[in-house]
Image (spheres, coloured by chain):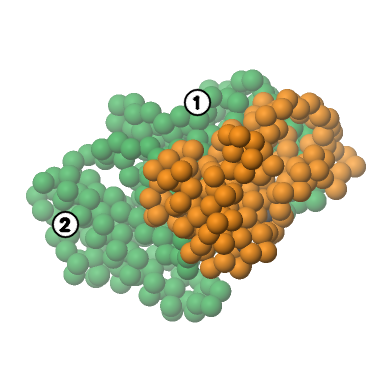
Amino acid sequence: MKLCEFIRPATLAQARASLRKLGPKGMPLAGGTALHFMPGKTPVSAVDLTGLALSYIRQKGNFFEIGAATPLSDIQRYRSPRWAMHEICRRISTHQIRNVSTIGGNICRVFPWADLPVVLLAMNARMVIYSGKAKEMGADEYFSSQPARLFRNGDLLTAVKIPVLKAQHGFGSVKATRNAAAFSMVTIAALLELKDGRIAAARVAAGSAIPFPKRLRSVEAALLGKEPSSETFRAAAALAGTDAKWCKQEGMSAEYVAGLAEVSIVDALERAAEFARGRTA
Amino acid sequence: MISRNSKSFSLSCRVNGSELEREIPSSRSLLDFIREDLGLKGTKEGCGEGECGACMVLVDGLAVNSCLMMAVQLQGKELVTIEGIKGKDGGLHSLQKTFLAEGAVQCGFCTPGLIIASEALLRRKPDATLEDIKLELTGNLCRCTGYEKVLSAVEKARRK
Ligand SMILES: Cc1cc2nc3c(=O)[nH]c(=O)nc-3n(C[C@H](O)[C@H](O)[C@H](O)COP(=O)(O)OP(=O)(O)OC[C@H]3O[C@@H](n4cnc5c(N)ncnc54)[C@H](O)[C@@H]3O)c2cc1C
Ligand code: FES
Ligand code: FES
C-alpha cells in the first residue's frame, strides 16, 4: 500500500476527525510494518498514531493496560509477577520488527499469521475503542470476525486491558515455527483456573493453521472439573478437530497440521498448569 | 519512485549527527530516502520485506528495517546509518575492527546490517551473552560466513 499523505494529529480527537473527513482514503498508521502486506493501488492518507501518548504499560486495579501504540519490544521487556505477555512477544518475528510493530497494529487488522489475537482470546482481554468517548469490548466479540470492521468510521483502538492473573490462574502459549523468526505454523494459548486441584475454568485459543483465530470450545469443555494431568490434556486436545478445521500449509498436509495442533495444545496446557502450580505453591 | 499523486512532506530530523530538513514525497520508503535521496549507499536492499536485515539502520537508537518504514516516520527522530558508525577517534568502530580481525566479512552485503544490529544490542546491553547475540541477529541473513565468525566478532567487540 502506498502513502500519498502523512498527517500528524496532536490529539486523539483530531486523529478521529481527520479519519472521518478522509473516509476510505484515510488509514490509521502505527508502526507501518503491515503496509506491504496490504495490497491496494490507490494511495492512502496515513494518520499517524505514534504521537498521541498511546505507548505505555501500566497496572491499574485488576488489569494491565497496554497503550495501542506500544511496540512489541516494550511488551517483551516488561516484567511483573502476574504478567505473561512477554512470552509470545519474544516469538513474533525479529527484534528489529518488534521495535516498530505495535500491539494495535497486530490486532486492528488481523493477518492469518497474527499471534496476539490468539493470546488475547485466551486471556479474555478487553479492547478500549475511542469513538468520541471510550468504550470497551471483550475479546470474544472483538475477534468474532476481522476487527478492521470496527475502525472504518474513524474510531481507533486506544488500549488493550489484560486481566492480572490470580494465584490460581496459569497461562501457557506455544508457537510452532520452522525457525526462530518464521511465521507460525500453529499458535495455541491456554488459560487455566485451578480450584481444589481441579480445573474450574479454561480458555483455549488457536490461530495460524485455521482461517481466523478462535477459541476451542470443545477442548475447554472437556477440561472442566478434571485434574490437570497429561491424560486430561491429551483427551481434551483430541477434540480440537470438532472446533477447528485445520488447513494444509506449505509442505504440510492438513493431517500433519492437525497432529501438530494437538501436540501444541497439550504443551500449552502443560505450561499453563505448571504456571498455576508455581503460583499456588 | 515518486507517486504522481503524492503530497510532499517537510521532514526535519537528524542524520548521522547533523540536522536535516528536506521536502520529500510522502510515498518515499526510508530505504529509498537513505540510498537515493541522501546517497548513503552503505545501507543495502536485499529482500525489501523485512526478512534479511541488509537495510538495517538505527532510529532513535533502535535497530529497524528501513525497507519497512516510510521516510515520513523519521520526523523529529535521529537516524544513524552505517556511515555514522565510527570509533571514538573517528576511525573504525570496535565492531568494524573485530569483524575484520575475525574474518566475519566475505562479500560484505549483510555486514552493514549486522554491525547496526550488534551496535543496537551492545548499546542496550554491554554485557550481552552469546545467547543474546544470537537472538538479536535472528533478523540478519548472511549467505557467506556461516555466522560463527560473526558471533565471535560481536563477542570480542563486547569486551573492548
Ligand atoms: C517480516 C514480518 C514478519 C512478521 N511476523 C509476524 C508473526 O510471526 N506474528 C505476528 O503476530 N506478527 C508478525 N508480523 C507483524 C504483523 O504482520 C504486522 O506487520 C504488525 O503487527 C503491524 O503492526 P504495526 O504497528 O506496524 O501496524 P501498522 O502497519 O501501522 O497497521 C496495521 C493495520 O492496523 C491498523 N491500525 C493500527 N493501529 C490502529 C489503531 N490503534 N486503531 C485502529 N486501527 C489501527 C492500520 O490502519 C492498519 O490497517 C510480522 C511482520 C513482518 C514485516
Ligand atoms: S531489505 Fe529490509 S529486511 Fe531485507
Ligand atoms: S558476507 Fe556475504 S552475505 Fe554475509
SS under mark 2: loop
So how many labels did they put on this image? 2
Residue B52: % across, % down: 62, 58
- Element at badge 1? strand
Which chain does green denote in the image?
Answer: A
Out of B84 and A260, give the one closest to the viewer: B84
Task: Check the residue under mark 1 and report the chain it is in.
Answer: A
Q: Find out whether the residues at labels 2 and 1 contact each other: C-beta distance under 8 Å.
A: no
Q: Residues within 10 Å of mark 1 (few under 14, many from 20)?
A: some
Judge the density around disc 2: few (<14), some (14-19), many (≥20) Cα neighbours within 10 Å: some
User: Which residue shows up at 33% across the image and 70% down it?
Assistant: A263
The picture places residue B24, in percent across and down from the top left corner, at 82, 34
Q: Colour of chain B?
A: orange
Name the residue beneath numbered marker 1.
Answer: A134
Q: CA distance from mark 2 to mark 1?
A: 38 Å
Q: What's the chain of the residue with tag 2?
A: A
> In this rendering, is residue B81 above or below A18?
below
Residue underneath mark 2: A225
Q: In this rendering, does residue A174 appear at all?
A: yes
Q: Residue at x 11, y 46 (%)?
A: A281
Q: Could you say which is closer to the camera, residue A43 or residue A199?
A: A43
Q: Amino acid at mark 1?
A: Ala
Type of amino acid at the residue the image marks with label 2: Gly
The numbered mark, 2 or 1, whose residue comes first in the sequence reads 1
User: Residue at the spot x=64%, y=58% of the render?
Assistant: B110
Residue B51 in view in this figure: no
